[in-house]
Amino acid sequence: MEPTFAGRFGVSRRARGSHKGVGMRRVPVVTVVGTVLLALLASAFTVGTGNAQERPVRADDGARVVAERHVGPRQLDLTIDSPALGTTAHVRLLTPDGWSPGRHDWPALWLLHGCCGGYADWTKYTDVAQLPELRRTLVVMPEAGAAGWYSNWWNYGKGGAPRWETFHLTEVKQITERGYGAGGRRVAAGLSMGGFGALSYAAHHPGFFRAVASYSGTVHPLLQVPGGFGPDWFLNLDRQVGADPYAIWGDPVRQRAVWAAHDPTVQASSLRGLPVFLSCGNGKPGGPHDPPGTKDPNEAYFEQQNRALAARLRALGSPAVTDFYGPGIHEWPYWQRELHRSLPLLLTALGA
């Protein structure tokens, strides 16, 4: 069975609201002085490539910020020239009250997007920017590719770009710490592919995150269940979004060890002792945010994965906090709600 993509992997299927530009009042300029003054004011309030070059922020491997842009209250977009990716990529920061680049001890919440989505999704489709609980936390929302899978790609044994894990955990980490106030206390949360990313990164790098949360996460890629759901499901997904499915982790049979190394349930022993929050719907009709009669077999598959991971963690003596909430599909209203429900666990771990 091939997955359906519209609205199911981190991109809302609901009609996008129009984004009207801010109206500007015409002001007659009658002197050269007035024209110059307007130009100076414009340059003072526009942050772009020039500003980034005046205050370069670099990672050890040469990754650097090439542009900054304020896109809303407390929202700053960075463009990073990344050796790990071989191209540029974006990170959105939601800055805390009293933030300044010179302070270097803000606790950080990393919010990871899902497949087919992008770095701006969390601020587009949730109320994260309005949450009072996060006014003392730096929120880091990095780009991860439409189907980057938060991984350094196998690339048929050759490695090389894209190396998303290196981009995030080395380049973005160092840049946000050196130039944008991030401290050493971090937690992560993500939806769908991003939930996978939070758990995979935590398993690969114990101690990097103090807690992780996964909402409808793809947390057991090797799980095979009736109905065509299993590793081939992931290959179909990657293929349909334009990625080479075998470049990421290889063939699930021939390169099973690579797949296993990127399967959070297989790697669950590395999550032992870490506060973990897992949530998922069961894809059945009757969810409070769904049209009547709506079913979602993909969400049902994800629930099976999450229950398998929860059982594994329980067997290891490190039970996760779970919210398997029954009817509900793979959609943003649930992920916003689950972010709210998981914040106590995440912020307690942060000490924020």
Image (cartoon, grey):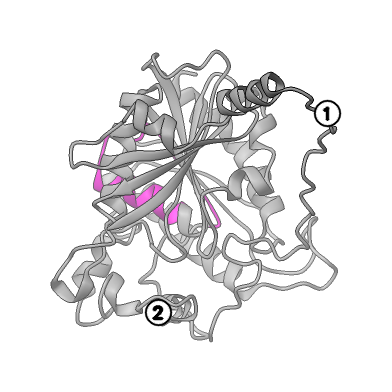
Percent x, y of residue 307? 49, 59
Work out whether mark 1 precedes mark 2 in sequence or the reverse, and give the earlier one: 1
On the image, numbered disc 1 is attached to which residue? 27
Which residue is at the front of the view, 319 or 5? 5
Percent x, y of residue 89? 40, 51
Compared across the picture, whether 280 is left or right of 245 comes to right
Q: Amino acid at mark 1?
A: Val
- Residue that appears at 68% across and 49% down: 125
Q: Residues within 10 Å of mark 1 (few under 14, many from 20)?
A: few
On the image, numbered disc 2 is attached to which residue? 235
Q: Which residues are magenta?
A: 195-216
Query: CA separation, marks 1 and 2?
Result: 57 Å
In magenta segment, residue 203? yes
Image quadrant assignment for residue 263: bottom left
In magenta segment, residue 4? no
Q: Is residue 34 above or below residue 118?
A: above
Compared across the picture, whether 307 is left or right of 295 comes to left
- Residue that appears at 83% across and 28% down: 27
